[in-house]
Amino acid sequence: MGNTTSCCVSSSPKIRRNAHSRLEPYHPEPELPRDDTGGNLQHISDRENIDDPNMEYNPSDHPRASTIFLSKSQTDVREKRKSLYINHLTHISESKHMAAPLRRKYSSCSTIFLDDSTVSQPNLKYTIKCVALAIYYHIKNRDVDGRMLLDIFDEKLHPLSKSEVPLDYDKHDPEQKQIYRFVRTLFSAAQLTAECAIVTLVYLERLLTYAEIDICPANWKRIVLGAILLASKVWDDQAVWNVDYCQILKDITVEDMNELERQFLELLQFNINVPSSVYAKYYFDLRSLSEANNLSFPLEPLSREKAQKLEAISRLCDDQYKDLTKAAKKRSVSADNLMVVRWSPAIIS
């Protein structure tokens, strides 16, 4: 109690006690420079680049960005058009007096030709063909800049069959028919839908963009398998289990499928969302790719039953639009134009 010294030191800078317990006059401490106080630190919104400008060019996330497979196919499409034009001129010069058969069906006043593929219900067979064609252009026109090859997708390290992988397995590009047979086998065995094929292509391009890798002869099968595996689980209500794919691909193990799925998700940064606008963009770009490569969807004449069904759907949509218009007018009408008869209850005493 009587000691003049204490083991406790006051934390307040304003009040300090000396040996005689007298108050010293307060002298404010000099201000620290801005660099020492951390006042020059950036705001968290400036340090964390939330809106990455590079993501705007990612077609699997933004509907306005052009799809990668369509841009990669442009070079080959121009060459095909040139060769077709030259062959067409040659054919005309050789058979001027012969009637050339019509290869394409055109609608007329009496007959309307439509295909059975829509954005909500695509044609399964031709959608798989278009997806296989898009993968083919990815492999053929890939960027040869020495990008890394991830081990999980390397078919030499993780073969899909017990047959020996050839030494030049990474040298020869697969044909479109080979890719189509591989995708069609998985879709037919797992009973997947055409919408799942479109989502598969979205995940494939998202993987190539996020992981900064290229699809090549050495890894295309396992990349496609991982994209199909993930798309089937996200899109279909009754997803196919990993063990089911082991029944389709007899020589692959469940542990390998689980590891493939896990690393695929990590490379996608667990972004498995596919907006409806992105889905519609991929669907119509696949149709453009099919038309540019003479892979048109089958056309059938519009029957009376289909015409009646379309008319009923259009009437239903028209009625719904009218109801929405009426509701909007009721909400936005001006108070000056309101002439409502109000009824007041009579009080009988």
Image (cartoon, rainbow, N blue to C red):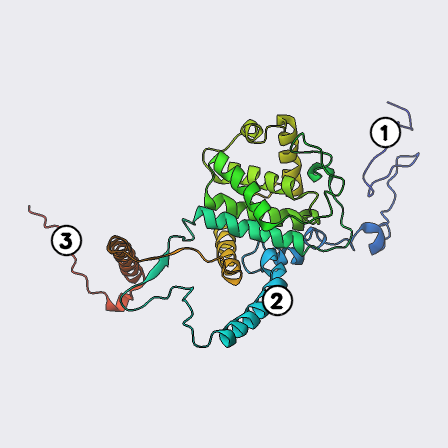
Q: Inspect this view and state whether residue 148 appears.
A: yes
Q: The C terminus is located in which quarter?
A: top left
What kind of element bears circle 2? helix
Between the C-alphas of marks 1 and 3, the distance is 80 Å
Instruction: Name the N-terminal-most of marks 3 and 2.
Output: 2
Instruction: Name the N-terminal-most of marks 1 and 2.
Output: 1
154 displayed left or right of 130 = right
Q: Tell me where residue 6 appears, x and y as whole percent.
A: 89, 27
Q: Tell me where residue 1 appears, x and y as whole percent.
A: 86, 22
Instruction: Name the N-terminal-most of marks 1 and 3.
Output: 1
Q: Mark 3 points at which residue?
A: 344
**Three-letter code, disc 2:** Glu
Q: Tell me where residue 128 appears, x and y as whole percent.
A: 51, 47
State the mark number for residue 79: 2
- Say which quarter of the image contains residue 327: bottom left
What kind of element bears circle 3? loop
State the mark number for residue 8: 1
**Three-letter code, disc 3:** Ser
What kind of element bears circle 1? loop
Residue in the picture at 45% in, 46% down: 124
Could you tell me if the residues under marks 1 and 2 are in contact, i.e. CB atoms within 8 Å?
A: no
**Three-letter code, disc 1:** Cys
- Crowd band around label 3 with a 10 angstrom C-alpha radius: few (<14), some (14–19), many (20+): few
Between the C-alphas of marks 1 and 2, the distance is 87 Å
Residue in the picture at 61% in, 39% down: 226
Q: Which of 205 and 286 lies nearest the eye of the viewer?
A: 286
Q: Is residue 51 above or below residue 193?
A: below
